[in-house]
Amino acid sequence: MDDRENQERLRLMDEQLKQMSKLHVQAEQAKIKSETIEVLTKVMSAAFDKLSSYTSLIVIGGYAAFFSVWSALEKFVSPWVRLWTFGLMGISILIFVLSETYRITKYSSEMLSWLRILKATSPERFKAQQEELTKVQDRKNVERVKTQRIIQFVVTGLAVVAALILFYGIGEELWKDRYKKWDNHTPALPY
């Protein structure tokens, strides 16, 4: 019986060892996953900040270029083309400026909230609190990507439609002008 008990104990210990080993592997995998997600979140947050600034610069440059072309060519297009292009670009700029103002205001209020929290935090807990707030901010930045994509799509879409209308108007005027010359042209008689 002693031998049977020992074998049973060994079998149970072996099962427990396998279970503990399995739990250890799962814990390591969860730790690696968590660390990877944390790194990816930081990278995405930093990329979002950089891309957001770069995109804003590109959009502002696009507006400046459009209105330069528009003002140079406005005398060559019909009033309805001027009205529609100006209106669409005005709406696009309004959406862009409002979204940027909201984003900056929201970010500023979050930073002020951070400062209040950190000032009230005890020195022992300061580092942990700072890391926690950074993680929260990184997650918020990742979530903001969706909203920014929608806003950029709308802003760019309106600008593209305005540019297409402007090009159409220019083409229409050039076409009319060309055929106006043809209408005034009287061929010389051969005799």
Image (cartoon, grey):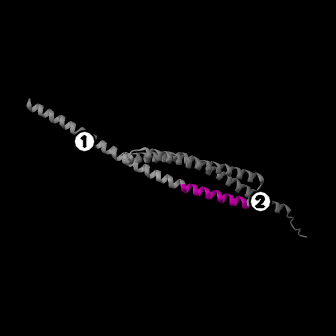
Residue interval drawn in magenta: 53-72
The x, y position of residue 38, in whole percent, is: 40, 48
Answer few, some or many: residues within 10 Å of disc 2's Cα (few below 14, many 20 plus, some between 14 and 19).
Answer: few
Answer few, some or many: residues within 10 Å of disc 1's Cα (few below 14, many 20 plus, some between 14 and 19).
Answer: few
Q: Circle 1 sits in a helix, a strand or a loop, which is it?
A: helix
Q: Nearer the viewer, residue 84 or 45?
A: 45
Q: Nearer the viewer, residue 6 or 39?
A: 39
The x, y position of residue 12, in whole percent, is: 18, 34
The x, y position of residue 170, in whole percent, is: 73, 58
Relative vertical location of residue 129 with respect to residue 76 in this rendering, above or below: above
User: Which label's residue is closer to the chain start, 1 or 2?
Assistant: 1
124 sits to left or right of 79: left
In the rendered image, the residue lying farthest to the left is: 2
Could you tell me which residue is drawn at 62 percent across and 50 percent down?
97
**Residue 149 on the magenta segment:** no
Residue pointed to by mark 1? 21
Residues at marks 1 and 2 touching, judged by CB atoms closer than 8 Å:
no
Q: Amino acid at mark 1?
A: Ser
Q: Amino acid at mark 2?
A: Lys
Q: CA distance from mark 1 to mark 2?
A: 79 Å
**Residue 67 on the magenta segment:** yes
The x, y position of residue 147, in whole percent, is: 55, 45
Residue pointed to by mark 2? 75
